[in-house]
Every structure is written in structure tokens, then in C-alpha cells.
């Protein structure tokens, strides 16, 4: 399942440093604008203690975690929507992603140049937002001119619904608001998906802070919270500098000791990867046995046949039923056989909506 989160932001806010920490790919990290020219794609494991516990119980020959793709996209500047800087490339790259991790600089450091000369994460956010909104407005106005003809002359009911949605989006964009701020009905969600709007993508604002602010944030983070309170968006606090230091440590024990000293339960990178996974609307089911314990990625709301198809297309085509064990039951009873004996194994059909953490075995016939 190739869904991608794009790391975006102005030059020199810490995007590439974070990418280096979370990804198996290696982006150049330097103290000058546009050090990332081509988008760097990396696939990284999604930390999941449930998989570790299953492996501890089953002692399999191999353990395979879920993964998420992260793209480090070139820094954006004012005028990107008109082709300034690497604007056209930036906008094309971000259009290909499914969700956005918008990194904002929330720290002071005289040794790290800011492209606008001062630290102001709300201003930085608005620069990126404005460029994306301008591009979306161009898209919307183009679609309106086409859709109006279908809605008025042809009497197309679907076109009328789309036109109404387009006009609402246009009004929001003209007010300097992103499309994700517009509330949609279930029917409109489907219509909106086909528009591929940049400001309609799920977004998480990643506040890159100094070491001292890694736990509770600072006044810059507070300003960001206030600025995005009306958006359908999330905020995460992380210190890219701290994360790069953690990434350089060789042993798990050293990393944990360092985190304990900072008052952190887990690294910001682990939290960010898991947050990116959920931002994409993904969840995990497991297969567990002596040969392999594996985390499989599906969309939230997927039904059993769809989950089976992730393992192999033949499983979905010939789906008969699924045997489902809840993660907590597997851990409590210690084996599939014990779960069966206790009557805790459920048999589910085609309409079963898979739950996050389900341990599944599929029966099929082709």
C-alpha cells in the first residue's frame, strides 16, 4: 500500500534533519536554503510494541513490521505558485503525496539562517498556506467554469452538487482559509477527493523546538496552536537536533537513558512515524505464527476481504471467512490454541470491519 507523507516547509526549518532521523533514505542536511533539490523518498518501519509482544510469544523465524513512506520535499518560498524558487517542482511533488507533515521552526539559533531573517512560525505557516491556496484557487476556478455549463444548460444534478461545493471552496480560499476548513457531508467527501486539492490534504504541524522545549513546547508553539485552532489539523512538538543525537547512538539502552534524562517516554521520531501512519488513515492487523509475525497495513474501515487481499489478491477473490483473535486475548491466553479452547476465536464473514490490532487467519478458495 503505497501512501506517502510529504515533509514540507520553508528552507532551513529542519525538514531534512527530521527526514534523516526517520527514514532509511538519506537527505543532505546543511545550513543553506534548497539543500534538498530532488524529493527524497524513504520507507521507515512503524514502531509497534504489539508486534514485539507477539514475537515474544510466538518466537517466529522472522518479524516484519508495517512501513510508511516519507518524502522530503524541497523548501518553498513566497511566489512558489508563480514559479518562484523551486515552486513549480514543490507544488508538483506535494500533489503526489497523501498527507502533509508541515515543519515549522519554533527555536532561536543565530547559527542557523532563516530565509526571512527572523523566527515566526505563524508567518512561515501562512507563507506556505498562501502558495497552496493560490494554486487551489486556480484549480477551483477552472473547474467552476466547466461545471457551471453542465449544471445550468445540461441540468446535470451531480454537476449542481459539485458546483455548490466548488463555490464554497472558492469562498473559503478567498478568505485565506484552506479547503480542509470547509465542513463536508459524506457525499461531498467523495466529490472533494476527485478534485485533488493541495489544502484539502490531512496535515500535521510539526513544531521543531530546542532541546529545552521538547517536552512542553514554548511561546512559538503556543502561537501555532492558536493559529490552527479552527483547522482540522494536528500539532506535534519535536526537537530535530535532539532526534539527530538520538539517531547517532548505537545502543537501545543509551537511547532510552538519554530520553529518560529529557523526561520523554519515547523518541519524537517514533511518535512522528506513528502519527504519520494514522494521519494517512491507516491501521494494522497482524498474522502471527512460528514462521512469521507480521504487521499488515490497511485503511481504517476496510472489511475482511479487503484485508485478505493485502496479503494476496487470491485471498480476496476467493474469500470464505476470517478467523479473528483480539490482540488482548492472544496476549492473555498465550497461544492460538489456548484462545480457541477458551472460545475467544471469532469467525467473521465478508461484512466484518477489521479492527486495529486484530490477529487474523483467512480461509479462501480459488
Image: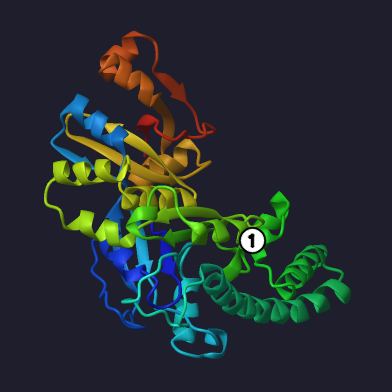
Foreground: 313 or 239?
239
Residue 197 shown left or right of residue 34 in the figure: right
User: Is residue 166 positioned above or below 138 on the image?
Assistant: above
Residue 238 shown left or right of residue 222 in the figure: left
Residue 115 shown left or right of residue 222 in the figure: left
| Residue 196 can be seen in this image | no
Foreground: 147 or 331?
331
| Residue 290 figure quarter | top left
Mark 1 nearby-residue class (10 Å; few <14, some 14–19, many ≥20): many
Q: Which residue is mark 1?
A: 180
x and y percentages locating residue 118 in the rendered image? 47, 78
User: Is residue 60 positioned above or below 142 on the image?
Assistant: above
x and y percentages locating residue 346 in the rendered image? 43, 20
- Image quarter of the N terminus: bottom left
At a point 52% along the width and 85% down the height, the residue shown is 80
Callout 1 secondary element: helix
Foreground: 181 or 320?
181
Foreground: 246 or 213?
213
Amino acid at each position: 500500500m503505497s501512501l506517502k507523507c510529504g515533509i514540507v516547509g520553508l528552507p532551513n526549518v529542519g525538514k531534512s534533519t527530521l527526514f534523516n532521523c526517520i527514514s532509511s533514505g538519506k537527505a543532505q542536511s546543511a545550513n543553506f536554503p534548497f539543500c534538498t533539490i530532488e524529493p527524497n523518498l524513504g520507507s521507515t518501519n512503524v514502531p509497534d510494541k504489539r508486534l514485539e509482544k507477539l514475537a515474544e510469544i510466538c518466537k517466529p523465524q522472522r518479524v516484519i513490521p508495517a512501513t510508511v513512506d516519507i518524502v522530503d520535499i524541497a523548501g518553498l518560498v513566497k511566489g512558489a505558485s508563480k514559479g518562484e524558487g523551486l515552486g513549480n517542482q514543490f507544488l508538483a511533488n506535494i500533489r503526489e503525496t497523501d498527507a502533509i507533515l508541515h515543519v515549522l521552526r519554533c527555536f532561536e539559533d543565530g547559527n542557523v539562517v532563516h530565509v526571512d531573517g527572523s523566527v515566526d512560525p505563524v508567518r512561515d505557516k501562512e507563507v506556505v498556506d498562501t502558495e497552496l491556496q493560490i494554486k487551489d484557487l486556480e484549480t477551483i476556478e477552472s473547474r467552476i467554469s466547466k461545471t457551471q455549463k453542465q449544471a445550468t444548460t445540461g441540468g446535470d444534478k451531480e454537476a449542481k452538487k459539485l458546483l455548490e461545493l466548488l463555490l464554497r471552496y472558492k469562498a473559503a480560499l478567498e478568505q485565506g482559509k484552506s479547503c480542509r476548513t470547509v465542513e463536508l457531508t459524506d457525499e461531498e467527501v467523495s466529490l472533494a477527493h476527485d478534485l485533488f486539492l493541495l489544502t484539502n490534504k490531512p496535515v500535521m504541524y510539526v513544531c521543531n523546538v530546542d532541546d529545552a522545549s521538547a517536552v512542553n513546547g514554548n511561546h512559538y508553539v503556543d502561537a501555532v496552536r492558536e493559529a490552527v485552532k479552527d483547522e482540522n489539523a494536528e500539532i506535534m512538538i519535536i526537537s530535530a537536533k535532539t532526534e539527530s543525537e538520538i539517531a547517532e547512538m548505537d545502543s537501545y539502552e543509551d537511547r532510552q537513558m538519554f530520553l529518560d534524562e529529557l523526561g520523554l517516554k519515547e523518541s519524537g521520531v517514533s511518535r512522528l512515524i506513528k502519527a504519520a501512519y494514522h494521519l494517512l488513515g491507516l491501521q494494522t492487523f497482524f498474522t502471527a505464527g512460528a514462521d512469521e509475525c507480521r504487521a499488515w497495513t490497511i485503511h481504517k474501515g476496510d472489511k475482511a476481504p479487503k484485508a485478505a487481499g493485502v496479503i494476496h489478491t487470491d485471498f480476496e477473490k476467493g474469500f470464505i471467512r476470517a478467523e479473528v483473535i483480539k490482540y488482548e486475548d492472544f496476549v492473555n491466553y498465550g497461544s492460538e490454541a489456548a484462545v480457541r479452547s477458551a472460545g475467544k476465536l471469532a469467525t467473521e464473514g465478508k461484512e466484518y470491519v477489521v479492527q486495529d490490532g486484530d490477529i487474523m487467519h483467512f480461509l479462501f478458495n480459488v
